[in-house]
Image (tube, grey):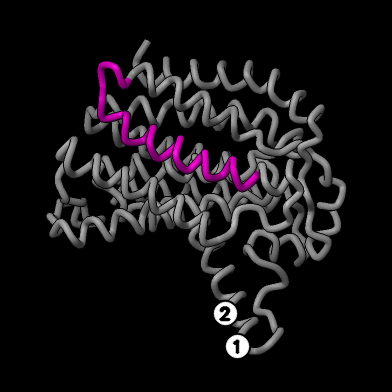
Amino acid sequence: MNTQTLNLLVAFAATVLLGMIVVPQLKKLKVGQVVRDDGPKSHLKKSGTPTMGGIVIVIVLVVILGIHAIKNPVLILPIVAILGFGIIGFIDDYKKLVLKSPKGLSPKLKMLGLFIVTAIFIILYINVFDMGTDIIIPLVNQPVTLSTGVFIVFTAFILLATSNAINLTDGLDGLASGVVAIIMTFFTIVAVKQQNTEMIILGAASVGTCIGFLLFNFHPARVFMGDIGSLALGGAVASIAIILKMPLYLAIVALVSIIDTLSVILQVTYFKITKGKRIFKMAPFHHHMELSGMKETKVVLIFWIVTAICCVIAYLI
């Protein structure tokens, strides 16, 4: 059995088994989702659904990568991003859902935490593993070496933007986990082509755990991943893209997450400028599609299909 298949199956089985233990416990602890009353009315019935299920994703990925990191130390990089971002997401979820603090972790402290994790990742990448500052340009398919300063700023942007984009995409049952599974399938195929053993392990394990989590998270969801899961998965996606020297390809394969992110930025900016007017019925964009009359499952399916098409395009170019 090849590396990618083995790690995918192990991650899938571990996620399902751990989920069967964790999900009932989250339900007992009454760590329930708080649903916005200005959103789609169909979401009101989701109120109280256990969240913070992303802890399963973080545990499975960190354990699998940790075991392999003994022989493949480069895997320390994605472990830092996944665990670091996951911890920040956990604190935010814990404050909102357990301590009942409406705003959770303050935006300033949240960004500070994300910056610290990002800084550790970049220091390890450049100074410890000495992995260079080159990136591959789409279409040209040739590497370009950036100056250290430009690379640091660009890599920090990729880590922070990707984690937040996946976080915003996590708004419908199975949406984020499905999108990430497809994106990581693309990067796993690329890693196999490049014969990059470490990234094959990361990609396959991520796909396996996302598919396993979908068994609990697909509509109607029995559990939500929360910030702990979405931020951690964003760290995984950013890590594999950076290590494979393909961060620019995220502009293609993560198109739906970019659209969701831009819709939020545009909505907030327009709302402030016009003193209360909106571009979309609700942001992120997937909620606008729902409020325009599209069923939740159809929106999720469209986002999955678009992501798959984008991944095929990215591979062909």
Q: Residue at the location (65% across, 48% down)?
A: 300
Disc marking residue 273 = 1
- The residue where tag 2 is placed is 269
- Residue 155 visible in the current orientation: yes
Q: In this image, 107 relative to 48: left or right?
A: left
Q: Residue at the location (65% across, 81% down)?
A: 271
Task: Please check the rendered image and state whether residue 46 is part of the magenta-colored stretch, yes or no.
Answer: no
Q: Residues within 10 Å of mark 2 (few under 14, many from 20)?
A: some
Q: Residues within 10 Å of mark 1 (few under 14, many from 20)?
A: few
Residue 18 image-quadrant placement: top right
Q: Nearer the viewer, residue 248 or 239?
A: 239
Identify the secondary structure beneath mark 1.
Answer: helix
The magenta segment is 69-93
Is mark 2 in CB contact (under 8 Å) with mark 1? yes
Identify the secondary structure beneath mark 2.
Answer: helix
Quarter placement of the N terminus: top left
Amino acid residing under circle 2:
Thr
Disc marking residue 307 = none
